[in-house]
């Protein structure tokens, strides 16, 4: 019985840490600059985009309490 509960807890924790895929479209100049920045700094483009979304949500007071996926 405990193993079933542990398995459910593990799967619940995994789903909370998963990132949701999203398709975005950027103007070509933005996309080029983001690519260049990522190459220069060796930080993934997706990391920069998550940071930008978090900043936007914080600006408008909508940042979720749980930021563990960042």
Image: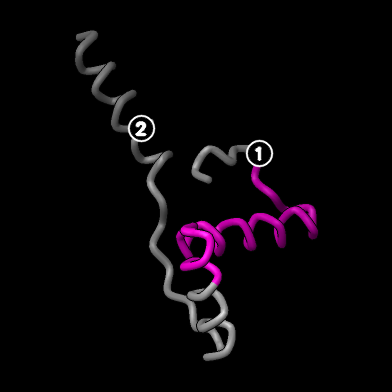
Give the colour scheme of this rendering. Answer: one colour
In which quadrant of the rendered image does the N terminus lie?
top left
Q: Position of residue 7 (x, y in %)?
A: 24, 22
Q: Are marks 2 and 1 in contact (CB under 8 Å)?
A: no
Residue at 55 percent across and 64 percent down: it is 49
Q: Position of residue 15 (x, y in %)?
A: 36, 40
Residue at 33 percent across and 23 percent down: it is 9
Magenta part of the protein: which range? 37-64
Count residues near mark 2 (Cα–Cα under 10 Å), then give few for <14, some for 14-19, many for 20+: few
Residue at 66 percent across and 38 percent down: it is 65
Q: State the residue position of label 2.
A: 12
Q: Of the residues under marks 2 and 1, which one precedes in the sequence?
A: 2
Q: Position of residue 25 (x, y in %)?
A: 49, 83
From the viewer's perspective, tell me whether residue 65 is left or right of residue 44: right
Q: State the residue position of label 1.
A: 65
From the viewer's perspective, tell me whether residue 30 is left or right of residue 16: right
Furthest-bottom residue in this view: 28
Furthest-front residue in this view: 40
C-alpha distance separating marks 2 and 1? 18 Å
Question: Relative to residue 23, is residue 12 depicted above or below?
Answer: above
Q: Position of residue 57 (x, y in %)?
A: 70, 57
For the residue pair 69 and 11, the one nearer the viewer reads as 69
């Amino acid at each position: 019985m405990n193993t079933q509960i542990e398995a459910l807890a593990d799967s619940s924790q995994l789903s909370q840490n998963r990132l949701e895929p999203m398709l975005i479209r950027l103007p070509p100049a933005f996309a080029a600059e983001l690519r260049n920045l990522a190459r220069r700094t060796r930080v993934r483009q997706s990391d920069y985009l998550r940071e930008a979304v978090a900043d936007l949500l914080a600006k408008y007071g909508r940042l979720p309490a749980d930021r563990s996926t960042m």
